[in-house]
Image: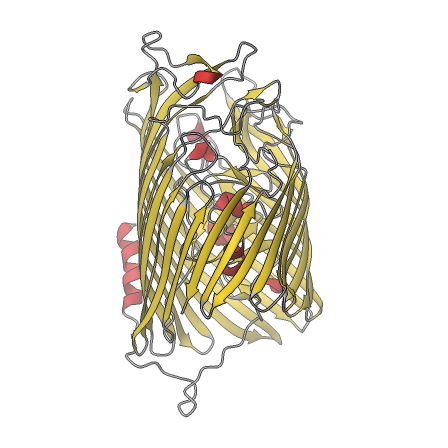
Amino acid sequence: MRCALLLSSALLLALPVATQAETLDDDAGTIVVTGQREAPYRAGSISSATRTDTPLLDVPQAVTVLTKQRLDDQAILSVQEALRFVPGAVGAQGEGNRDQIVLRGNNSTADFFVDGVRDDVQYFRDFYNLDRLEILRGANAMIFGRGGGGGVINRVTKTPDLAAQLIAADAAVDTWGSWRVAADLNQPLATGIAARLNGFYEEASNHRDFYGLTRWAVNPTLGLDLGGRGNLVLGYEHAADDRTADRGIPSQAGRPAPVSRNLFVGDPALNRSRVDVDALSLAADYRLADSLTLRHRTRWADYDKVYSNVYAATPLAADGRIGVDAYADPTRRHNLFSQTDLNWKTAIAGTQHNILAGFELGRQVTRNQRINGFFDGIIPGATRAFVTLADSARPPLATFRAGPGNRSIRAQAEVAALFVQDQVKIGDHVELLGGLRYDRFELAVDNLFSGARFARVDHLWSPRLGLVVKPMATASLYASFSRSYLPQSGDQFTSLDASLAALEPEGFLNREIGAKWDITPTLNINIAAYVLERTNTRAPGAVAGTVELTGRQRSRGIELGLDGQIAKWWQVQAGLAVQNARITSTTTAAPAGRHVPLVPEFQASLWQRFQIAEPVALGVGILHQGASFTSISNAVRLPAYTRVDGAVFVTLAKGVSAQLNVENIFNKGYFPTAHTDNNISTGTPRTARLTIRTNF
């Protein structure tokens, strides 16, 4: 497997690299490119949804694209912040140590991709090197493979510009004393060769007592023209993140406890999360013939992460006491993925075809532990301590050591996939999309405590069907059917045992209809209605102690989006979602009828930027999130909230601008998300952030 992965990448390096780029017109020396018109808040096309460059109007799936301009205007730097303005999406707390998402009622820590390649370790991702952020909703293993039951998040990174020099830098400070600097440098080195360097450094604080964050990253890339027929991009990234693992406050009587939103529960010395990521990437696109293109992506990544925490494990009692538990969790993972596609455009019997065929190879080796904390100062061997809330940041010292309930595993996952897809254009009004993917997914998990080894091989077929009807060139109606799957070991491979190794993967079936309309060339409105069924969920068996795959979950909803440019001086992005996610057949976690956690029945958001004069622009955002439950117990509810944000943008000189963002203008107290019934995040009070941007 490893040899095959390396060979598929090495073949790409044999493609000719031109020292002087070819052109389509030797006299003019120019290349004419056609495509969808884009606006600062709107992308015209996307490649991750189909693995081909396809106008968003022709993609039979709900997709939200947050452009770099939009992310910058709102000073958004994290996945959780970004998802607050995406219909049908919620950012979960992730125990204060990772990105975690809920898309269409399906919770995941692993459905993250970078430039279309899996990036699934549990950590926080920064946006310093992003060109845009793509949120694709609905199961779609045909494109992305396992997981992605509710959708995926794909980060599209910046690449070298072969023609233009760029020197850009940002500096920002906020009212909590946080500061950040970032740079983006692009330099052509010779004809057909350019280098780009993105990097940042940040030290941050917030309203939470004892909270602190230091993170930095650097991402050099090298771009080469392949004889005028394509390009090759080589990249390396190192990212480091060291922060307080903050798990919020406990509950009381079915609601967040009535305590200060600043109150930290844990041990400031032990609640830490540290991660180092090193990644190498290769991306090549090469035109073999006028209608035949080769596309290749390889990514190798090493993730070294450890977090430890002391956290609230019980509600706040009437006597003002809570129970706290503790554990540490080190993880080391090596990922190697390789994707190779052929894209052929042809005409058959009067129909236009865009045929994709390819394969994907992947190997992941994981070493993970869970090391429980013991409060021996209270009772030798005690794994829970009870403290008053006033002393919750000074619990008895926890010692992490081997003991009951610990985990120590080594997992190896290998995937080999083949896929084929055809996008068929029938006349001017009908388009069909059909695809099928086969995966051989092999997982072996060694229990390093017992010496036991559990393994499973799954052969999985993932179809995708879509119909797009275009009553006019600027509007489309679509219907789609797609499926995905998730092995019973979970999305981080930590729970495979003798019982689970005998069980088939969970299945996700997404049925969706929708409409998209380019009201103007720079403004789009879209609507989607879906039913997403999750099956093969574990349920108690008829014989005590056994497990059956009879559990089910259903998510249903409607999502509405508006993005783009209403007028040259008016940018807008808006979203609305009405959704319901329930357990429909009893699982090992909950009886039928329970609400799926962190799924508000109603969400709405609106962000607008107005250029009111030549040097000055204003931004205003309104965010509403309905009530939801913190866990599958449905015992604790997060109340609904509405938040208002604002911004002022001023051009100071050519290439120099300043912006002041104010989050939560009216200082609303709210609870945006949670991890369990007693790990509830508190919303940030009114915060101002000043950013200076330069671009030359």
Front in this rendered view, residue 151 or 330:
330
> For residue 552, what is the image quadrant?
top right
Q: Position of residue 409 (x, y in %)?
A: 32, 30
Farthest residue in the right direction?
471
Left or right, residue 168 beside residue 346? left
Compared with 611, 668 (above or below) is above
Left or right, residue 9 beside residue 680? left
The residue depicted at 53 percent of the width and 26 percent of the height is 260
Front in this rendered view, residue 314 or 553:
314
Compared with 269, 493 (above or below) is below
Colour logic: secondary structure
Farthest residue in the front direction?
652
Front in this rendered view, residue 266 or 368:
266
Image quadrant in which the C terminus is located: bottom left
Compared with 231, 30 (above or below) is below
> For residue 43, what is the image quadrant?
bottom right
Compared with 212, 145 (above or below) is below
Left or right, residue 52 beside residue 195? right
Q: Position of residue 558 (x, y in %)?
A: 69, 47
Front in this rendered view, residue 410 or 374:
374
Q: Position of residue 679 (x, y in %)?
A: 50, 26
Q: Position of residue 362 (x, y in %)?
A: 36, 49
Residue 50 seen in render? no
Residue 329 seen in render? yes
